[in-house]
Image (cartoon, rainbow, N blue to C red):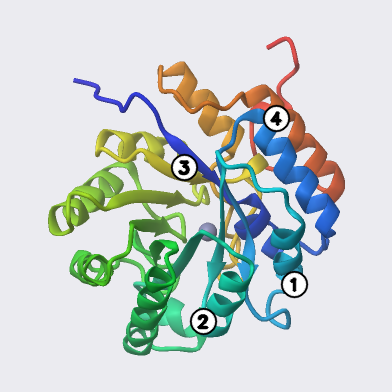
Amino acid sequence: MFDLPKSVVLEDESLRDGLQIEKAQLSVEEIIQFIKGMEAAGVRRIQVGSFVHPKWVPQMANTDQVFQELERRPDVIYTALVLNQKGLERAIKCNVSHLSVSISASETHSQKNTNRSLAESLVQIREMVLGSVAAGITTRAGIQSAFGCAYEGAISVDVVCDIARLYDSLGAHEINLADTAGLGNPRSIFDLVTGVRAVISPGIKLSLHLHDTRGLGLANMVAGLQAGVSNFDTSLGGLGGCPFIPKAAGNIATEDAVYALQEMGVETGIGWRKLADLAIKLEERLGHPLPGRLAHLPRAA
Ligand code: ZN
């Protein structure tokens, strides 16, 4: 039987995962306008930015200011990424109620991305999850390159499950499995989700972050649905990539995911047409086309 959840929550990550690889620097006002546009379309989970050092990711330098100036709606979750203690302190100062932390399951990706070994990352992430949970923040702990690594290829299921168990034991509220390199396929998504689900507490949420580098993003989302996942990361227009993985594509486009879910009878609360218009605005601002499909279809279609 083709079992699907009744409803799905999408977290749009275009303003963080997407913008961090762009040359253009959006102003605080522009970022807030895009957030408002997404809210108007029905998006209820938005990753606003990241509290990282502006020297490494200058596009995210205004995240503190965005949080300070943004009028936060009670029905919307505004989240951000933090990578270290300093970032966590900044997030707490900005009253952020929902945070993402993450490490890579791949030794090489970890070294390239953070200059830390996997063992060092495990020590550091422990403090991060504990600190975030202790601050009363809903904490999502992520595992990058869970479905394969651009440098190493296959990643051991045991390594991913061990990290998931650690997150669970530290009190994380949600575990995010990320196909950072876009190497997952519907079968590997289904199998890993099922494998991780079996080793963590039933109450902890599982979400998927699916880069569409090889065109399998939406098929992978459907495999995730079949495995019982009802939280997915997406990106307006499919914006994004990874500065440390050459030719990486962005996440599945939010509007395309909404359309696919709607056509399968799964509720998201989001209107894809409004999002498609917003994706076009984003393209215009960034000065290049985005890979999403629905935004480029003629209006009558
Ligand atoms: Zn990503």
Q: Amino acid at mark 2?
A: Asn
Q: Residues within 10 Å of mark 2 (few under 14, many from 20)?
A: some
Reading the image, the residue beneath label 1 is: 61
Q: Are marks 1 and 2 in contact (CB under 8 Å)?
A: no
Q: Vertically, is 152 above or below 263? A: below
Q: Earlier in the sequence, mark 1 or mark 3?
A: 1
Which amino acid type is shown beneath numbered disc 4?
Ala
Marks 4 and 3, Cα distance to the nearest angstrom? 18 Å
* Residue appearing at x 70%, y 66% in the figure: 63
Tell me the mark number nearer the camera, choosing from 4 and 2: 2
The residue that disc 2 covers is 84
Q: Considering depth in this image, is 189 or 88 the residue closer to the camera?
A: 88
Q: CA distance from mark 1 to mark 4?
A: 27 Å
Q: Secondary structure at mark 3?
A: helix
Residue 154's quadrant in the figure? Answer: bottom left
Disc 4, SS:
helix
